[in-house]
Amino acid sequence: MHKSLFIPGPVNVSKDVLEKMATPMIGHRTKEASVLQRNISDKLRKLMYTKEEIILSTSSGSGLMEAAVKSCTKKKAAVFAVGAFGERWYTMCTANGIPADRFDSVWGQPTTPEMVEEALSTGEYDLITITHNETSTGIMNPVAEIAEVVKKYPDVVFCLDTVSSLGGAKIEVDAWGVDICISSTQKCLGLPPGLALCSLSQKALERARTVENRGLYFDLVELYDTIQKKDYQYPSTPSLSHMFALDYQLDKMMEEGFEKRFDKHLEQAQVVREWAKKHFEMLAEEKYASNTLTTIKNTKGISVADLNKELGKRGFTISNGYGALKEKTFRIAHMADTTMEEVKEVLAHIEDILGL
Ligand SMILES: *Cc1c(COP(=O)(O)O)cnc(C)c1O
């Protein structure tokens, strides 16, 4: 039986979007491919509120996260972690021999502008990574406030992980001064996994041109220069199937209205938060709670694995806690095309199974 997904990616993909993945193949060096890739970039610029260039990558989002730190760190990276995905960015640095320091928040708490100020004022760093929406702890960082601090340091390249929020919350790339804003298709964009995307500022690009050993497949300079030269065609063969579906899904999102979608996710989050507070507790401080998923403290000591087994029999799946938070928390995601009705339905099933 197919299970309806309330996990933070992959998400349920609408049937019409899924069908676009089966579009007959075209050559990747054709005019059609150029038009398709240019159209996607134009639409993504609207969703990201940016005038900068868009890079598509046939990989998951992690590929472009690694690309960002590898292509753009010359001195040292300041990595801010509020959970597992911030930590991953630090591991990417060390695995590539990139000098980096990690600045952790207590899990459930955000990265604060003060923490960023303290680190950047040392002058040691020329790149910073921030997680917009931390999918392990359910934190949405106050990026608008953090951005005001980063703006005081024009030599610092600002990288933002919006893998689990782009399309589900407003991300103002240019207003915030984000140089590289990264996301994947399998979360709030509502596509299958396999394609990643980022915005790339001229500042980040100019930095990258001065960095050695950027690799090749994920070299942001190679990707940027190729799409300029070849009318939006990429150096290697991309997942055109994802592109057909993404182009279509972005049209659907624009028709619905981006702001309406952001509001929809917030309303769903508010319902899940109220439910969580009634029966359990939230992990995140509410002011910084994510709009696209809720991480719930398992204050009743239930077996999350058993709960999920029972939910599975009824055709639903939620997420256990991530890593060290397994069984201590569980997560209910409300991303992409999930409706309020579906959110209320899964909550009702959980209440019924647990006898709440
Ligand atoms: C899922 C996720 C990632 C990893 O993205 P992939 O597309 O799986 O590589 C990174 N950061 C956050 C916040 C995520 O939720």
Image (cartoon, rainbow, N blue to C red):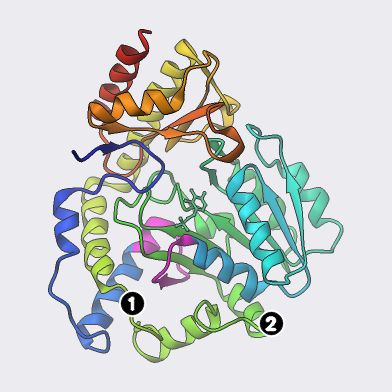
Q: What SS does tag 1 mark?
A: loop
**The disc label shown at residue 238, or none:** 1
Q: Position of residue 98 (x, y in %)?
A: 73, 70
* Residue 198 is covered by the magenta coloring: no
Q: Residue at x 31, y 24 (%)?
A: 310
Q: Residue at x 77, y 67 (%)?
A: 99
- Please give the range of residues in magenta: 44-61
Q: Give above or below for 29 relative to 335.
A: below
Q: Of 54 and 183, which appears nearest the observer?
A: 183
Q: Position of residue 13 (x, y in %)?
A: 24, 49
Q: Position of residue 208 (x, y in %)?
A: 63, 79
Q: What SS does tag 2 mark?
A: loop
Q: Residues within 10 Å of mark 2 (few under 14, many from 20)?
A: some
Q: Which residue is mark 2?
A: 211
**The disc label shown at residue 17, or none:** none
* Residue 45 is covered by the magenta coloring: yes
For residue 298, side relative to residue 116 (left or right): left
The disc, 1 or 2, on the residue closer to the chain's N-terminal end is: 2
Q: Give above or below for 181 relative to 266.
A: below
Spatial CA span between label 1 and label 2: 25 Å
Could one spot residue 136 in this view of the protein? yes
Q: Position of residue 347 (x, y in %)?
A: 33, 21
Q: Give above or below for 296 relative to 13.
A: above
Say which amino acid is labelled 2.
Answer: Val
The picture quadrant where one finds residue 206 is: bottom right
Say which amino acid is labelled 1.
Answer: Pro
Q: Quadrant of the N terminus?
A: top left
Q: How many marks?
A: 2
